[in-house]
Amino acid sequence: MTSILIADDQALVRVGLRKILESEPETTVVGEAKDGEDAVAATRQLRPDVVLMDIRMPVLDGIEATKRIVSAQPGTRVLILTTFGLDTYVYDALRAGASGFMLKDAPPEEIVAAVRIVASGDALLAPAVTRAVIEEFARQRPAAPPAPPPALAELTPREREVLDLLARGLSNPEICERLVITEATAKTHVARILQKLVLRDRVQAVIYAYETGLVQAGAT
């Protein structure tokens, strides 16, 4: 059973999400929060598996709330909910430690699937809109590429290839097709990359690749 906390300042949104999630036999909503501060406090008390986090909330916004939750409750994962596909805060939310994001108007089955993906320990990078957002906000941060961090030297040439493709938004099946490897091998490579670079999930690997200059925004 996956436990979920819904954080949104709009009561109607919280009610709608609760109905969607509680209609599933394997998910349960353990609480609601009307702002970021409430979300942090409720997460500390309830320890949900997943927090559905709105970005724009009073008292404490979703970005700062995500930072506090991820740092204090590493077992809880945050899935950002946003109204706009290119919300100017999404990239910051991912950097804060969110494991992905969904549009609020996504079909119910996509929201349920997103919660399952995040709860399983993976990151939500599959939708094409995610690739567009990461590219957009990486592009908004022009800077001279820094010197490659020492940790990159620990990666094998194949792991560097996989990280490069992962950072461009490719899923495991797409990586398999590009490199002609099995899905089990791709998963192993991804797991080793995350371990060597001390990263939590695929989203953080994407952010790392952009911020270290390994991948340039707009590259294909």
Image: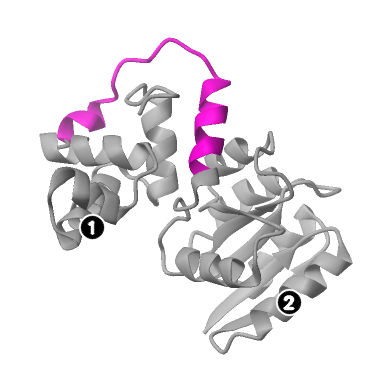
Which residue is at a point 84% across and 58% down the rendered structure image? Answer: 9
Type of amino acid under label 2: Arg
Name the residue nearer the viewer: 133 or 35: 133
Instruction: Residue 50: say if magenta.
Output: no
Q: How many labels does the image show?
A: 2
Q: Do the residues under discs 1 and 2 have CB atoms within 8 angstroms?
A: no
Quadrant position of residue 154? top left
Query: Seen in the image, is 187 located left or right of residue 2?
Result: left
Instruction: Residue 145: say if magenta.
Output: yes
Name the residue nearer the viewer: 24 or 3: 24
- What coloring was used for the rendering? one colour
Read off the residue under disc 1.
187
Q: Quadrant of the C terminus?
A: top left
| Label 1, residues with CA under 10 Å away: few <14, some 14-19, many ≥20 | some
Type of amino acid under label 1: Lys
Read off the residue under disc 2.
18
Which residue is at a point 15% across and 57% down the rendered structure image? Answer: 185
